[in-house]
Image (cartoon, rainbow, N blue to C red):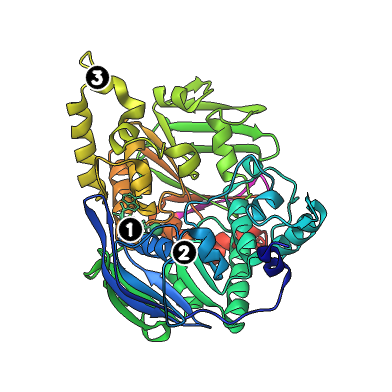
Amino acid sequence: MNPQNADLRNANPRSGLHVAFDGITKDFGAVRVLHGVGFDLHPGRVHGLLGENGAGKSTLMKILAGYHAPTAGTIRIDGQPTRFAGSRDAEERGIVLIHQELNLADDLTVAQNMFLGHELRRGWLLDDRAMRVQAAQALRQVGFDGDPDTKVRDLIVAEKQLVEIAKAQLRHARLLIMDEPTASLTPSECERLFGLIARLRDDGVTIVYISHKLDEVERITDEVIVMRDGRFVARAPTAETSRRRMATLMVGRELTDMFPEKRTVPPSATPLMAVRDVTVPGWAEGVSFDLHPGEILGFAGLVGAGRTELFEGILGLRPRSAGRIELNGKAVRLRTPREAMRHGLTYLSEDRKGKGLHTSMRLRDNLTLMTLRHHAHPLLSHASEDAALARAVTAFGIRGDPGGTAASLSGGNQQKLAIAKFLEPDPRVFVLDEPTRGVDVGAKRDIYFLIERLAAERRGVIVISSELIELIGLCHRVIVMRGRRVTATLPADRLSEEELIAHAIGTHTRH
Ligand SMILES: Nc1ncnc2c1ncn2[C@@H]1O[C@H](COP(=O)(O)OP(=O)(O)OP(=O)(O)O)[C@@H](O)[C@H]1O
Ligand SMILES: [Mg+2]
C-alpha cells in the first residue's frame, strides 16, 4: 500500500513541527520580495502572521510548504536543514497549506478533490466507497453538509473554502498553514473552524493563521508575527498586543479614522436605481428597493441569504422570474453585465478569481478590458492603456510588478486591481460584493474613502458585505436579507451589530 494512504487512515494525532526560518530571501526575476526573513514557529501554538498586502506572507508560507524554493536562506524543521522538492514532499512531512486562492479542480467532485494525489486503493482499484465515507466524515467536522459527490464548480465560494479545510484535516497535518481561511465563511462556520483550530492546537499541531481580520487574530492566536515589505518586523504575545498596535506594526504608522464622515444624502426626485418585486428562483423573492444619488446602501445577511444571487439575477447572470428594474426612471432589461454597464451600472463580483480578473493576463490588459474603445484612437493605444494603469497603480496603491500578470500580485493587490478595473468605465451605479475581502487595514481605509468619494459625486453605491463594522461605518441605509427575503431596512441611526445580526438570523422581535 502507498505509505501516504496508511497515513490517511492513521487518525492518531502526531506532535507538531518546530520550524526555524533563517535568512530566507526570495526573488521573482529581478524583484526581491523577501529580504532575509528569520523567525521560529512552535508546536502547539497558533501564530498569527500579519502584514500589509504584498508584505510577503503567502510567499514565505509557499516556500515552507514546498511550492517555491527560496533564493537564499535555510529552513530548519525540528532542527534539520530541509529543502523540499515540491509540495508533495512537504505534505509527506506533514506540512499542509490551505491556499488563499482556493486550489480545487472544478470538474472533479468534492470527494475526488479531497483525495487528489492521495487516492485510497483496494488492490489495483480505487476504493471509492472508503474515500466517500472518509470525505463525508471530514466534511461534517467542518460543517459542510452538502453531498461529497457534488462537482466543485457547483459550490459557492464559502463551500469551497470548507472543502479546502476538510481536505487539510484528512492529511493529518503536523503544521497547518491557513491563508485567510475565513474570507467567505459565515459566523457559524467561522466558529466551527475556530473550534477545530483550538483542538488541533491542543493536540500539539503547529498552526500559522494569516488574516486581515484583526478581531479573529486577537481571538484565536497565541502570538502575532508581523512582516512589512518582505521583512520580519516584530513578534509579540497576542494578549499583550491591541488591534491598534497590530495595525500600526503592519502599516508602519498610526492609522486614524477608518471611515469617512457620513454626509446626509441629498433629496432627489428620481432614484438612480429602482428594483421592484424581483424574484430570482431559489435565491430571492419579491425584493424591492431604491438607491438614490449620493447614497451608500448596504446589504447584510448570512452567506446563502441570497444577496449575491439577487444581484446576479438583476444583472442577468441568473434567471429572473419576475420583477422590474429602473435606472434613472427608465425601465431596463439587463441580460449581461456588459449590457448593465452600457446602462451605467457595474458589478464587482465577490468571486474575483473566477469572475473578476483574468489572472493569466497582464495588469494593463485586465484593467482596460472593459473599456478598450476608450483607448482606441482609432488603433488601440498601449500608451493610453499604460497611462490608465499608472493612474490606477497610484490611486489604489497597487504593489507589484506593473508589467507582470495579475497572478503575480498578492491576494490583496489583486483585489485592488479588480476594483480599479471596475471603476474604469465610470458608471453611475456601483454594486460592490465584498469589496474589502483580503485587503489590509490601510487599503481598507482607502477603499472606504474611495466609496464615499464616489457617492459624494452623486453616484449610487451598493455594498454587499459580511463585515458588519464596514456596513455600519459606511452606509446610509442597510437592507438585511434572510432566507431569500428582505427582513429589514435600517437607517444609519439604527445600525448596530446586535440589530443587524438579529435581523439576519431571525431572532428579532417587534416591540
Ligand atoms: N509568482 C510571482 N511572480 C512575481 N511576483 C510575485 C509572485 N508571487 C508573489 N509575488 C510578489 O511578491 C510580493 C509578496 O506577495 P505575497 O503574495 O507573498 O503577499 P502577501 O503578504 O501574502 O499579501 P496579501 O495580504 O495581499 O495576500 C508581492 O509584491 C507580489 O506581487
Ligand atoms: Mg497573501
Mark 2 C-beta to ligand 1 under 8 Å: no
- Our reading of the magenta stretch's main secondary structure is strand
Residue 261 sits in which quadrant? Answer: bottom left
Tell me the residue that label 3 is attached to.
380
Location of the N terminus (image quadrant): bottom right
Measured as percent of width and height from the top left, residue 275 is found at 54, 32
Residue type highlighted by circle 2: Ala
Mark 1 C-beta to ligand 1 under 8 Å: yes
Tell me the residue that label 2 is attached to.
65
Q: Residue shown at 25%/46% (left/top)?
A: 401
First in residue order: circle 2 vs circle 1: 1
Residue type highlighted by circle 1: Asn
Q: Residue shown at 20%/39% (left/top)?
A: 391
Tell me the residue that label 1 is attached to.
53
First in residue order: circle 3 vs circle 2: 2
Measured as percent of width and height from the top left, residue 412 is found at 37, 53
